[in-house]
Image: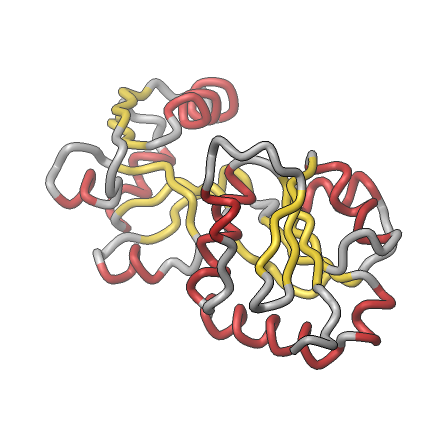
Amino acid sequence: MEDMRYLTFALGKGRLANKTLELLEEIGITCEEMKDKESRKLIFVNEEQKLKFFLAKGPDVPTYVEYGAADIGVVGKDTLLEEQRRAYEVLDLGFGKCVCGPQSAKELLQHHEMIRVASKYPNIAKDYFYNKKHQTVDIIKLNGSVELGPIVGLSDVIVDIVETGSTLRENGLEVLEEICPLSARMIVNQVSMKMEAERIRKLISQLKERLS
């Protein structure tokens, strides 16, 4: 392990970084330093696993990866399309926002009826229904498990971030409409993919298994 070089991750700041770190924790990759909200550090290190992490603005992530300042990056697909940087896109991490609910609610969405929408993201939900669908809705902000909304009769549908969709299915819900289909992608520097092929492929394999 002493001779192993560090693998460096560039993560898009905010929700994307948080969701990525949660996902990495599920496969045993952690960085305790990043949990300290008071920290002024710019680069966070896991010495044991020989990993480094830093946060960057979304549009800068592909630049860091293309030029080798980061081996791996996580950024929205929309940013990748916009920036057109040279890097391998290796994994779709999901994290897209969707309208979800029981199958029976699909008709309510098509007929533009007045419905109740529960969400942790009331502003995004409001923008989608009012400005894109032109549907009048009653939006209820929830902080916890929004899947409960339709189950207990609080709401007709929910707006939530869907990763694997397994929680939805277990509760009789499904994705009815996509709000932000451009999900998060993992990208890899082209040289790193050759030099650190084994480590990176193992990481991708573990994440794929977790997301399936």
Quadrant assignment for the N terminus: bottom right
**Residue sitting nearer the eye, 76 or 1:** 1
**Residue sitting nearer the eye, 42 or 24:** 42
In this picture, residue 158 sits left or right of residue 14: left
Scheme by which the image is coloured: secondary structure
Q: Please, is residue 163 above or below residue 60 in the view?
A: below
Residue 29: give x, y in percent of width and height. Answer: 51, 64
Q: In which quarter of the image is residue 135?
A: top left
Residue 33: give x, y in percent of width and height. Answer: 51, 47
Q: In which quarter of the image is residue 177?
A: top left
**Residue sitting nearer the eye, 172 or 46:** 46
Residue 72: give x, y in percent of width and height. Answer: 71, 58
**Residue sitting nearer the eye, 77 or 176:** 77
Residue at point 43%, 21% (across, down): 123
Residue 63: give x, y in percent of width and height. Answer: 83, 45
Q: Please, is residue 156 above or below residue 132 in the view?
A: below
Residue at point 21%, 56% (across, down): 171
Q: Residue furthest bottom?
A: 198
Q: Residue furthest front?
A: 2
Q: In which quarter of the image is residue 112?
A: top left
How many numbered marks have been drawn onto this rendered protein structure?
A: 0
Residue at point 26%, 40% (across, down): 146
Residue at point 53%, 68% (across, down): 207
